[in-house]
Image (cartoon, helix red, strand yellow):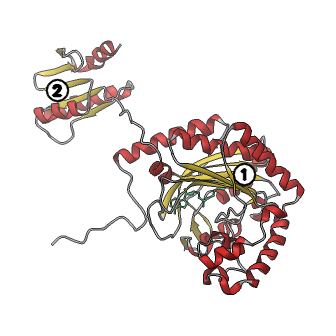
Amino acid sequence: MSRDRIQVPKGTFDILDEDALAREILTDTAKRILEGAGYERIETPTYEATELFARGVGESTDVVQKEMYSFDDGGGRSMTLRPEGTAPACRAFIEHGMHKRPLPVKLWYLSSFFRAEQPQAGRFRQFWQIGCEAIGSEDPAVDAETVLLLHELLQAMGVGGTRLRIGSLGDPATRAAYREELQVHLRAHEAQLSGDVRGRIDLNPLRAFDSDHPGTVAVMRDAPRLVDRLEAADREHFATVLALLDIAGVSYEVDTSLVRGLDYYTRTVFEFTSDRLGAQSGVGGGGRYDGLIEQIGGAPTPGMGWAAGVERILLAGQRQPVAPVPLHLYVAWIGDEQRPSAFSIAAMARRTGHSARLELAGRSLKGQLKQADRAGARYVAIVTEDGVELKDSESGDQRAVEPDEVMHHIRQGML
Ligand code: HAM
């Protein structure tokens, strides 16, 4: 009796065939754009102390309240599979004394992240993000430049139907005062609000702007707006960011109630959506987090960055034709005595930088030649008890060669 089949966990997926190739193209494209702009790759551990996300991302966020995969590390310490990459990058910035490097320190990552969300199209429990963080400069040019880099990446990947929304959250003090003002407004209209929003007036009143509950939407129409309360310096910072985007010719919509699901944002916040995606239309977003590093124990240091969902970029993007890696040599062989010779020809080919494949499943010679043809092998070495025949599939030329001269002939032929 066969046993029950074990399946991939809910909200996760395998990456196969064309998907793997499409991801490679995305990786190469991101690398070209981000490293071209001076970003260096960073990889942090898959899990971190739970405290990092609780303090960094914010206790009141959905991510921390409901979506973390936390576990005991065996020694009584709570660890969490990283739900996002900004807090870990900032932790690494502090830990490695990166403030001594030329600022801003520019880091990029392509890693998988984990959130215990209800899976749906474009929303997974393990998903990948490409992200970048520029740490150590308040200059509004950093904000505009990072937005442009994401814009360039989305364009390069053929992501269509995009919209860029951008706003400013000001500094923590303005935000705190505004928060109180908003709470007063929400309490004054409590009866009209959805239960969810009502329950969050104390914890996270800003999330009320996110609601599509009709009563709440009506209340929010007259709600005070943070952009109208910004300090002069923050207003000016935001105006400069927008002016730089204008110069770059990127179109955007200023969204006065743009809410992001993470608490560390200050000043600029932005998000790209694509109408090619369903309900989960956010392709990528980010913003400035000038208080985060201090929040997690470092010296006050400003930062700005974004992350974009790999799956969403691929869903909304144009599939690009993928050129397979060319196969230089296929080594066919029959009879157990020929195995060592065939094996050594393939090894020799690889040592000299050529791609080679070796028959590994005991196919008939006819079957092997079919495989070689299907794989598009330029040369086929056929090893039999009578010696080695080398066939050039381009010219049709076939000749007997010495086993240790196979590569010599191939090199000559491929010149
Ligand atoms: P986020 O908006 O939470 O930001 O995530 C960024 C992107 O990751 C989203 O726009 C979406 O494309 C993708 N994403 C998020 N959750 C899922 C999911 N469950 N399944 C599939 N894709 C998902 C951040 O994570 C911030 N760390 C961005 C940042 C960097 N801010 C400053 N620096």
Q: Quadrant of ligand 1?
A: bottom right
The quadrant the C terminus occupies is top left
Instruction: Identify which residue is drawn at 59% across, 72% down.
Output: 212
Residue beneath disc 1? 304
Comes first in the chain, label 2 or label 1: 1
The front one of 217 and 279 is 217
Q: Would residue 89 be visible to someone looking at this image? A: no
Q: Which mark is residue 92?
A: none
Amino acid beneath label 1: Met
Q: Residue furthest right?
A: 232
| Kind of element beneath mark 1 | strand
Q: Vertically, is 310 above or below 75?
A: above
Residue located 43% across and 65% down the image: 11
CA distance separating discs 2 and 1: 60 Å
Residue under circle 2? 383
Q: Give coordinates of residue 335: x percent, y percent.
A: 11, 34
Between 301 and 2, the one nearer to me in the picture: 301
Q: To which quarter of the image does residue 320 belong? A: top left
Q: Position of residue 310 (x, y in %)?
A: 50, 51
Q: Residue at x 48, y 65 (%)?
A: 125
Kindly indicate the quadrant of the structure image that contains residue 338: top left
In this picture, is 91 found above or below 135?
A: below
The amino acid marked with disc number 2 is: Val
Quick check: 410 left or right of 106?
left
The secondary structure type at the circle numbered 2 is strand
What residue lies at 63% left-to-right and 69% top-to-bottom?
210
- Image height check: is 328 above or below 70? above
Q: Is mark 2 within 8 Å of ligand 1?
A: no
